[in-house]
Image (cartoon, rainbow, N blue to C red):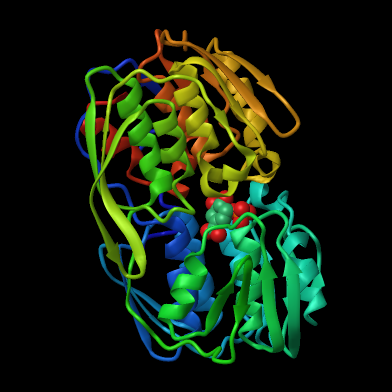
Amino acid sequence: MRSVTAAVEADSDRLEGHRSGPLRGTAEVPGDKSISHRALIFGGLASGTTHIDGLLEGDDVLHTAAAVRSLGAEVERIGDNRWRVTGAEWRSPDAPIDCGNSGTGARLLMGAAAAYPIRATFSGDASLSSRPMERVLGPLRQMGARTEGSTLPVTVHGGKLTGISFDNVKSSAQVKTALLLAGLGAEGAVEINEDLPSRDHSENMLRAFGVDVEQDGTVVRLGRQRKLTACDVAVPRDPSSAAFPIVAALIVEGSEVELPNILINPLRTGLITTLKEMGADIEYRNVRSSGGEQVADIVARHCALRGVEVPAERAPSMIDEYPILSIAAAYATGTTVMNGLAELRVKESDRLAAVASGLRTCGVEVEEGEESLTVHGTGAAPRGGGNVAAYHDHRIAMSFLVLGLASQQPVAVDSAGMIATSFPSFVSLMRELGADIR
Ligand code: S3P
């Protein structure tokens, strides 16, 4: 297994995006991060052996692989992006579980561990240790778990849980999944209501593992059959990673990039919807179903963009894509208004503040509201030329490197090493397309 501290290919933590010639070719982005975490955890809970193909081998997911192993399952890397997981009754780990930078890993594992009569302590890096965990711990306590700490390190004492009826007002798929996983070991009804639906990979994958999961209007409910049986998982490529080469192709003159086998679950494609409203030349080819999820080959070509207003209700389906959408907005003609962004403040960084300050550094006019962001595009290439602080956030780093590919002056980004958490091949993939990233 690769080390969980595997470094990004960059020599140092600082990278620069320079104005580039046309981006051309095929971008094989890595496997979907959400589905990769779930495949390892669900495989670790199931009876039998699960084979996973296409797993994202980024630092976040590698931390989850190590965590599932320390909780008792057998987790082996058997080839490039191919893993084998044999489930077990989870046991108390010998040492605290290091979740690295990953909120998804931490929150899903806490829920899953709570279903067993075990004690597990979860820790993480500085960013993860400042992120809110009460959103999961509160409802887990309501189900009967005992917890210590409200930010990492957190200890969960699980077992003997009862059901819950929970209103998921933040539309958090992490919270929903944590409660469904805790509910697998609970007595009684487990139901989660969400008015704005969050990504449904857990529901889809739990069904594939043989669990009864019902959808009744806005309510997701666990049925009686709550035992997982091993099932092979083919992980489609990550639309949240594809977002970077897609927007790069849109803004760099003369570009045409093809991205095969991208997950196009409608609860993940708010960015594509928004970019199309902005006039983007994006095409889906060969739309098909693969392992219970919709996938397509995506083609993106350079074109003019116009500013739009993005409705707040769209936020759950593009929550991780606002930073890169803001870069597209900086190249558009007119104003783009993004609403309903409260959750951006508690991601790997305060992404609302990070994007606003980075754009200002690059000469773009922006207004940062408490829960909104407004970007004024002039239709001309932004000035660039700044040293952008990425606040140890992978998506902020990638977004501003993309901005630099078509700005008048290069854009330098710090903490680019964090890109390895979700997209370790980002720099080499972008360079192969023709991006000048140094
Ligand atoms: C994720 C859900 C989202 C998203 C995160 C992955 C998941 O977080 O931002 O990157 O895999 O369930 P929230 O559940 O906090 O909205």
Would residue 199 appear left or right of 195 to someone viewing this image?
A: left
Image quadrant in which you'd find residue 134:
bottom right
Q: Nearer the viewer, residue 273 or 413?
A: 273
The residue sitting at 56% across, 80% down in the picture is: 71
Q: Nearer the viewer, residue 4 or 301?
A: 301
Q: Nearer the viewer, residue 107 or 215?
A: 215
The residue sitting at 51% across, 83% down in the picture is: 45
Q: Is residue 374 visible?
A: yes
Residue sticking out furthest to the left: 25
Q: Is residue 229 above or below residue 438?
A: below
The quadrant of the rendering that contains the N terminus is bottom left
The residue sitting at 39% across, 33% down in the picture is: 276
Image quadrant in which you'd find residue 237:
bottom left
Ligand 1 shows up in which quadrant of the image?
bottom right
**Where residue 322 sits: x, y (%)?**
54, 35
**Where residue 82 sits: x, y (%)?**
29, 68
